[in-house]
């Protein structure tokens, strides 16, 4: 590999390129993860006790989670809710991605994409905060529903997981739309026409022609959305209540309130494993490789 | 053809609803800035006021947080952009067995939840006796922002015609000259876009920053803490200003892109 680099850039520039990549991959990507995993198997000790015979590897930090029914139920709820958020986002995004890629004229598509990008450029905290205003007990949504006579008294939207999920769909929708849009756009429109001419209905055309072609995009979108939802701290912290905590909030508490970093590292590693598991599952279901993802 | 017409109108209706859904929250948040109420809301409307902009300007902690955010973002720009460019150059040059593995490894920070990037950086540097603060925030954010830069530069590099390099070399340019006079100018637009994205990503990051910030507070962290404790419409004023700046930049960017596209078309003709 170095030979190929050297042939193109000369030896000194090649050494520089390799060195910079090496520092990033080893010092920022690989080693911190390994140290985190190492940390998660050790007990939480005073600085003076590190290296003594108390400092042994064990599964204790992992057993804590399975022994604590509250943490375990939050862990399960986080995974389940993230799956729901992913499915909801996919359902909302697909028609739009299809419209942008195949129905809209180039001018319309360019305008829509600009309109889509603007909220995406705005801070996630601010986007979530605006939902906080809308969903508040005395907020505009309750006022609207009351005025329409649909409800008798205001609903507490912010006390369950519903508010969190609405906020997440809103916050991550673009990570779903763009991969699917890119995938559908690369489909030859003649294939859609051919399917229609041969008598396939719209539903069948989507099911048999467009969706199979868009698989890598759908897979990428689902992976990104799930990862962002399961790993989100901002949305549940702003839109959730003490009764609807997210797993990331438990992790945060181990670090900055419980003061047990080893325990926190174990929980963080479990979250990472769930995300890796989800990626593997999606790749298997959609039969796509790692190379197809995040193109 | 009738079902097709229904289909078309159905999808247009859906698009309309979707964009209302996309923009209503932002409009309501902006409108709440001007409501003369102690809490950020538009119901009930208690008359228009501009006092929350004053309240914001008086907020010293906000200005400190803004400065911290700018310092962090500049730091990330300086570190992440060169790393991303190097990765893109590497991937576009080498062929061979390890390439897919290295590509996956370089992509992995984007598929890792932000909190975990923050946590692993915090633990790693604690073992080197470095605790949270501006420096650690820069390092943690660089971990994944470099991957974004890599993708953007790589996308442009893949359309590069390498015969241009061969021409420069055979005309007597050194490899270094070929790099700085041919390849870098070609990459310039992608590098500028990557800088903009890296800056924005850094500026608005919350999940990663939260774990590595130490006693420093970035603007995003500051806004989040305000929302949870001591919420007044001053937060909306700040949000409105940030949204306006963002929209302005987005429109300018799009306008410039169209101008450039037009120029390319006319130069071809």
Image (cartoon, coloured by chain):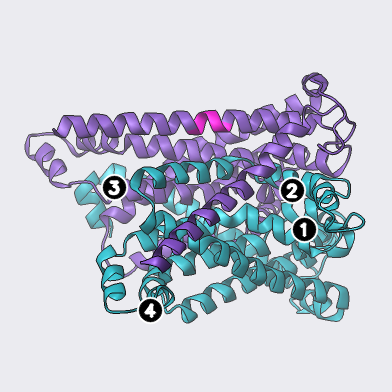
Q: Chain of mark 3?
A: B
Which chain is represented by purple in the image?
B
Q: Is residue B123 visible?
A: no
Horizontal and vertical percent for residue A205? 37, 75
Label 2 to label 3, Cα distance in Å?
A: 40 Å
Asked whether the residues under marks 3 and 1 belong to the same chain, the reply is no
Q: Secondary structure at mark 1?
A: helix
Q: Mark 4 touching mark 3, by CB under 8 A?
A: no
Q: Which residue is mark 4?
A: A208
SS majority, magenta: helix
Label 4 to label 2, Cα distance in Å?
A: 37 Å
Decide whether residue B249 is among the magenta residues.
yes
Q: For residue B157, which numbered disc appears in the image?
A: 3
Q: Quadrant of residue A293?
A: bottom left
**Residue at point 75%, 44% (across, down):** A129
Q: Residues within 10 Å of mark 2 (few under 14, many from 20)?
A: many
**Residue at point 15%, 34% (across, down):** B268
**Residue at point 76%, 65% (across, down):** A247
Q: For residue A163, which numbered disc appears in the image?
A: 1
Q: Residues within 10 Å of mark 3 (few under 14, many from 20)?
A: many
Q: Which residue is mark 2?
A: A131
Nearest to the eye among marks 4 and 1: give it.
Answer: 4
The segment highlighted magenta reads B246-250
Q: Mark 1 touching mark 2, by CB under 8 A?
A: yes
Label 4 to label 1, Cα distance in Å?
A: 35 Å
Chain A, colour shown: cyan
Nearest to the eye among marks 2 and 3: give it.
Answer: 2
Q: Chain of mark 1?
A: A
Dividing the image into 4 quarters, which one contains the C terminus of chain A?
bottom left
Q: Secondary structure at mark 4?
A: helix
Horizontal and vertical percent for residue B193? 42, 37
């Amino acid at each position: 590999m170095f030979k190929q680099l050297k042939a193109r850039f000369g030896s000194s520039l090649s050494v520089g390129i390799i060195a910079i990549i090496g520092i990033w991959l080893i010092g920022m990507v690989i080693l911190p993860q390994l140290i985190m995993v190492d940390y998660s198997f050790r007990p939480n000790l005073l600085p003076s006790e590190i290296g003594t015979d108390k400092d042994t590897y064990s599964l204790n930090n992992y057993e804590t989670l399975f022994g604590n029914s509250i943490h375990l139920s939050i862990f399960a709820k986080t995974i389940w809710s993230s799956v729901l958020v992913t499915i909801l986002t996919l359902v909302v995004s697909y028609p739009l991605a299809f419209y942008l890629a195949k129905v809209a004229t180039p001018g319309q598509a360019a305008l829509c994409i600009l309109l889509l990008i603007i909220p995406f450029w705005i801070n996630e905290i601010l986007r979530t905060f605006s939902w906080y205003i809308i969903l508040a007990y005395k907020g505009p949504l309750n006022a609207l529903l009351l005025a329409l006579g649909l409800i008798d008294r205001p609903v507490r939207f912010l006390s369950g997981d519903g508010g969190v999920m609405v906020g997440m769909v809103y916050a991550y929708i673009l990570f779903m739309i763009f991969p699917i849009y890119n995938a559908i756009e690369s489909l030859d429109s003649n294939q859609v026409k051919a399917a229609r001419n041969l008598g396939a209905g719209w539903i069948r055309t989507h099911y048999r022609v467009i969706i199979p072609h868009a698989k890598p995009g759908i897979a990428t979108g689902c992976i990104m959305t799930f990862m962002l939802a399961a790993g989100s701290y901002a949305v549940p912290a702003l839109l959730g209540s003490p009764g609807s905590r997210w797993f990331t909030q438990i992790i945060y508490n181990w670090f900055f309130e419980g003061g047990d970093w080893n325990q926190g590292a174990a929980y963080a590693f479990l979250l990472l494993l769930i995300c890796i598991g989800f990626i593997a599952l999606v790749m298997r279901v959609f039969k796509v490789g790692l190379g197809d993802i995040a193109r | 053809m009738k079902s097709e017409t229904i289909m078309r109108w159905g999808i247009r209706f859906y698009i309309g609803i979707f964009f209302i859904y996309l923009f209503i929250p932002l409009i309501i948040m902006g409108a709440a800035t001007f409501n003369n109420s102690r809490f950020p809301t538009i119901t009930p409307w208690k008359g228009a006021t501009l006092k929350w902009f004053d309240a914001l300007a008086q907020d010293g902690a906000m200005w400190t947080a803004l400065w911290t955010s700018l310092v962090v973002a500049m730091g990330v720009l300086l570190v992440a952009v060169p790393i991303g460019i190097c990765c893109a150059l590497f991937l576009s040059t080498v062929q061979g067995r390890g390439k897919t593995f290295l590509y996956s490894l370089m992509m992995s920070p984007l598929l890792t939840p932000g909190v975990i990037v923050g946590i692993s950086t915090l633990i790693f540097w604690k073992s080197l006796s470095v605790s949270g603060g501006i420096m650690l925030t820069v390092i943690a954010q660089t971990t994944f922002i470099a991957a974004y830069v890599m993708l953007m530069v790589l996308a442009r590099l893949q359309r590069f015609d390498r015969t241009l390099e061969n021409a420069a070399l055979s005309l007597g340019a050194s490899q270094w000259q070929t790099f700085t006079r041919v390849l870098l100018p070609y990459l310039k637009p992608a590098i500028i876009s990557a800088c903009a994205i890296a800056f924005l990503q850094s500026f608005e990051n919350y999940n990663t920053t939260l774990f590595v910030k130490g006693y420093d507070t970035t603007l995003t962290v500051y806004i989040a803490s305000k929302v949870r404790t001591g919420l007044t419409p001053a937060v909306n004023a700040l949000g409105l200003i940030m949204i306006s700046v963002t929209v302005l930049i987005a429109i300018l960017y799009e306008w410039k892109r169209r101008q450039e596209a037009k120029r390319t078309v006319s130069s071809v003709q």
